[in-house]
Image (cartoon, helix red, strand yellow):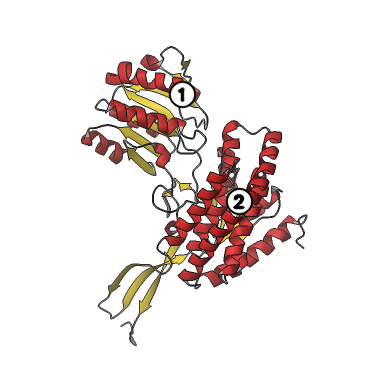
Amino acid sequence: MKDLDNIPALMADIGSRAKTAAQDLSFAGAEARKTALLNAADAVLAKTDEILAANALDLEYGREKGLSAAMMDRLMLDEARVAGMAAGLRAVAEQADPVGEVLAEWDMPSGLHIRRVRTPLGVIGVIYESRPNVTADAGALCLKSGNAVILRGGSESFHSSSVIHACLVEGLRSAGLPEDAIQLVPTRDRAAVSELLTMADYVDVIVPRGGKGLVGLVQREARVPVFAHLEGIVHIYVDKDVDPRKALDVMLNAKTRRTGICGAAECLLVHRDVAETLGADLVRALLENGVEVRAEGILAVEGTVPAGSEDWGKEYLDSIIAAKPVDSIDDAIAHIRTYGSNHTDCILTEDDEAAARFFERLDSAILMRNASTQFADGGEFGMGAEIGIATGKMHARGPVGAAQLTSFKYLVDGDGTTRS
């Protein structure tokens, strides 16, 4: 029985077992990892009722904590979302295995043959809030990439995550892989987070998924590398040469499909040449769909709320959006550079040169043209799932899938080769 009161000892034990499991996983066959994921998917479907019953407990806990509607939506599971989790596990299982992939190889005049090959990072710590599906996504991607993972879910999703984790362990067991390869921290005690962030002897990278408070804490306190984005301050710029129907469809989807995800649009910028016409129409459409629009200038049509300085660079994660006209594409770019978070930004235009300028002069992890920013997701990028979005510039950037959870090593072959 684990001593849940002695958090340092608990976490050290979890870390030690994860490190041992990672060493075994590093040479486990691709077929075994695939089998584990497929069987975990079957277990998730078989335990749908158990997962939903656990989720009902989490939803009650969330209501007692006074979680916002957006946070409750993130927490909530139904049959479709459980089926989606299983589909995600299968999608990751069926992907090409990244471990051992030869990234480059070449011969040297000295007679050496050199290969650069993908290798697992080791042990990954994932800290997340609310969304219980992250348990499945993170576990799957870490396993696929040959890494052990320590999952520390939010207190709100404690019951759901526990059942989902049990499904992953069932998959590991069925494939003869170490059950310690995917561990879930068995306590809501926040001291466990502080311990995980400083376990440099065991953990190779931390991935936080959650709000600004959580990610900021991790970035401040972690003693190991971090893959993270602090905020998803997502902009949509409507250029003067734009297809009105595309603009309406993309804008509404980008804002209203799911308001509480990091790819949801938070700021609408409209070229002044179309602000009074199409721009006003877009604002009215948002209002009609229940979105509060905090607008400036020509876009401040009837029903909007005046925008304040605090609305630029704001991640609402709610049915709220800021809107303002801009004089040119360069003004839009300048605004995004000032207030953006390097997550995802989009241009709506039929002008190839304008799109090229937008793509060239902004350095967000994801840049889009004429497509909803709600596609900013590893699953939609063909990764099966994602462990998070990274906005830093080292190693992983954008959606972090299995391949991004690897490093590389050099394999050097000689034939009695010596250096002169």
Query: Disc 2 residue type?
Result: Thr
Q: Earlier in the sequence, mark 2 or mark 1?
A: 2
Q: Quadrant of residue 40?
A: bottom right
33 lies left or right of 393: right
Query: Secondary structure beneath disc 2?
Result: helix
According to the image, label 2 marks what residue? Answer: 48
| Quadrant (top left, top right, bottom left, bottom right) of the N terminus | bottom right
Residue at (44, 47) in percent of width and height = 392
Please state the horizontal and vertical placement of residue 202, each as a whole percent of the image: 60, 63
Q: Is residue 303 visible?
A: yes
Q: Name the mark on residue 100.
A: none
152 lies left or right of 260: right
Q: Is residue 199 visible?
A: no
Please state the horizontal and vertical placement of residue 295, each as a whole percent of the image: 43, 19
Q: CA distance from mark 2 to mark 1?
A: 33 Å
Please state the horizontal and vertical placement of residue 65, each as a whole percent of the image: 69, 35
| Quadrant (top left, top right, bottom left, bottom right) of the C terminus | bottom left
According to the image, label 1 marks what residue? Answer: 289
**Of the residues tagged 2 and 1, which is closer to the observer?**
2
> Dot 2, crowdedness within 10 Å: few (<14), some or many (≥20)?
some
**Residue found at the very far bottom of the displayed protein:** 416
370 relative to 411, above or below: above
224 or 159, which lies in front?
A: 159
Please state the horizontal and vertical placement of residue 220, each as a whole percent of the image: 58, 45
Query: Disc 1 residue type?
Result: Asn
392 relative to 224, above or below: above
224 or 239, which lies in front?
A: 239
Labels in figure, total? 2
246 or 279, which lies in front?
A: 246
36 lies left or right of 6: left
